[in-house]
Amino acid sequence: METSAVARMEPASLPLNEFDRVFRDNYAAVFRAAYRVTGNAEDAEDVLQTVFLRMWKRDPERERVENLSSFLHRSAINAALDVVRSRQRARQVPLEDCAPVLAESAHQQPDRMRFGGEIREWLRGALARLNPREAQMFVLRFFEGKENPEIARLLDTTPGTVAVTISRMRSRLEKEFRSVGGGS
């Protein structure tokens, strides 16, 4: 159960030990969310710092945050999308290099690794072109593996809205992928 100072994230009344607890409880989830979007450990660390710095500096007069974990997760996705948009041409650490972070197998064929890297690069660019709400839904569904009702709860919308948005977005991304040579 969160204290009211933590739930409201008021920096003036948030003791350092409470901030430390919030950080320890949430840093791994924030890092993973950021890494899945950016594909780069250094960028994910930058996002991690940005999210918690913003939380610390948050104006106490802003609206109340009911679900701190959800708020931090969405903040990580949004900040990571900002990084992807601003660093489209930046050097990226291959996803396979951070396999322990994402619990993926590092034992892939070299040609599959190269093709997979090209697909991930295209997908990151495509995510950067989506509006923030669509990108959040996509990341939560396909990167985080969350189901529509949970996404709806996290984003304060209905499961039907999530389903329709994801379906339309997926069709649009598949069509775009085929048009750039990803399939017939």
Image: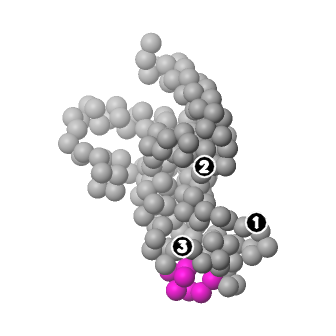
* Neighbours of disc 1 within 10 Å: few (<14), some (14-19), many (20+): few
Q: Which residue is mark 1?
A: 63
Q: Secondary structure at mark 1?
A: loop
Residue mark closest to the camera, 2 vs 1: 2
Q: Main secondary structure of the magenta part?
A: helix
Query: Is 90 on the left-hand or right-hand side of 11?
Result: left
Please give the range of residues in magenta. 14-20
Q: CA distance from mark 1 to mark 3?
A: 20 Å
Image coordinates of residue 60 in percent, x first then y, are 75, 76
For the residues labelled 1 and 3, say whether their Cβ atoms are less than 8 Å apart: no
Would you identify the image quadrant in which residue 73 lies?
bottom right
Q: Which residue is mark 3?
A: 1
- Amino acid type indicated by mark 1: Glu
Query: Is 119 on the left-hand or right-hand side of 82?
Result: left
* Neighbours of disc 2 within 10 Å: few (<14), some (14-19), many (20+): few
Q: Name the residue: 48% across, 67% down.
A: 26
